[in-house]
Image: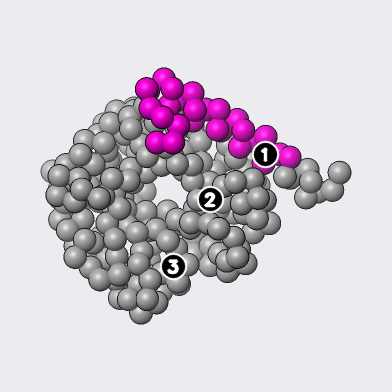
């Protein structure tokens, strides 16, 4: 068996296991399996893995560093994939990200909205945008920031309005990462339920912004139970890869 065949078999088996987890979580929550979309986070993994995943039926992939994502997206441009950018995004990377990402899940400040809008218009593309909510930020501070990026709950509505009004951008919903500190640390399902409450409030003003991205390899069940529409899974599909250098 070649290395390619071995890797394909490994990824296929991992996908089956993750699929079973999502299906079981949906059943437990009384939700249809089609209600939840799997996004495979391919950071640090090569384009060859992305190509295998596409062949196995994966349609959504995510990256968190532009220097990894840009060449990978270019190499896989012939594949029927939706590319999500999920990392903290510096404005000097916006032009590059706007050239390949279909959705940016880490919108957390007005300056980023302005820069993305400019580059989306320049590239003649429409970018889907999710507001990243920092549940470890002090919610009394509207523009409080979390340690893993994101804006505090009090700043969501104002920032969402900016996205909705920005040319070239489409407000799709909310994203969060389960916080490591603060009142929600170790309480993933409570954190995700708080995100769903914020989503309900957002949809009152922006009915089409119904995407809720939450949950990763370790806590996708809690995210599905809370109502997430998208889960972001890396390690459980791709395995643990030693860091370079």
Q: Position of residue 12 (x, y in %)?
A: 67, 39
Looking at the rendered image, the quarter that the C terminus falls into is bottom right
Relative to residue 11, is residue 222 drawn left or right? left
Q: Which residue is mark 1?
A: 12
Residue under the point 37% across and 22% down: 30
Q: Which residues are magenta?
A: 9-35
Q: Give the quadrant of residue 1.
A: top right
Q: Does residue 167 sit above or below 228 in this rendering?
A: below
Task: For mark 3, give the secondary structure.
Answer: helix
For marks 2 and 1, the one nearer the N-term is: 1
Residue under the point 15% across and 56% down: 158
Q: How is the image coloured?
A: one colour
Q: Position of residue 219 (x, y in %)?
A: 44, 31
Q: Which residue is mark 3?
A: 97
Query: How far separated are the C-alphas under marks 1 and 3?
Result: 29 Å
Relative to residue 140, is residue 194 drawn left or right? right
Q: Which residue is mark 2?
A: 59
Q: Nearer the viewer, residue 79 or 94?
A: 79
Q: Position of residue 90 (x, y in %)?
A: 38, 66
Task: For mark 1, give the secondary structure.
Answer: helix
């Amino acid at each position: 068996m070649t290395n390619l065949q071995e890797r394909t078999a490994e990824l296929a088996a991992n996908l089956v296991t993750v699929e079973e987890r999502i299906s079981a979580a949906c059943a437990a929550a009384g939700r249809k399996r089609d209600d939840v979309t799997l996004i495979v986070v391919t950071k640090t993994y090569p384009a060859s893995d992305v190509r295998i995943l596409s062949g196995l039926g994966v349609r959504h992939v995510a990256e968190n560093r532009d220097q990894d994502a840009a060449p990978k997206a270019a190499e896989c441009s012939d594949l029927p994939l939706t590319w999500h950018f999920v990392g903290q995004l510096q404005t000097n990377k916006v032009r590059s990200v706007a050239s390949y990402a279909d959705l940016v899940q880490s919108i957390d400040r007005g300056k980023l909205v302005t820069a993305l809008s400019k580059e989306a218009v320049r590239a003649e593309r429409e970018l889907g945008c999710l507001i990243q909510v920092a549940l470890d930020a002090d919610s009394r501070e509207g523009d409080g920031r979390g340690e893993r990026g994101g804006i505090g709950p009090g700043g969501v509505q104002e920032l969402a309005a900016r996205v909705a009004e920005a040319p070239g951008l489409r407000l799709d919903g909310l994203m969060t990462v389960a916080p490591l500190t603060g009142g929600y640390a170790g309480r993933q399902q409570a954190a995700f339920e708080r995100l769903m409450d914020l989503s309900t409030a957002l949809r009152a003003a922006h009915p089409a912004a119904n995407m809720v991205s939450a949950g990763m390899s370790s806590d996708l069940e809690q995210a599905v139970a809370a109502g997430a529409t998208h889960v972001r899974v890396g390690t459980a599909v791709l395995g643990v890869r030693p860091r370079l250098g």
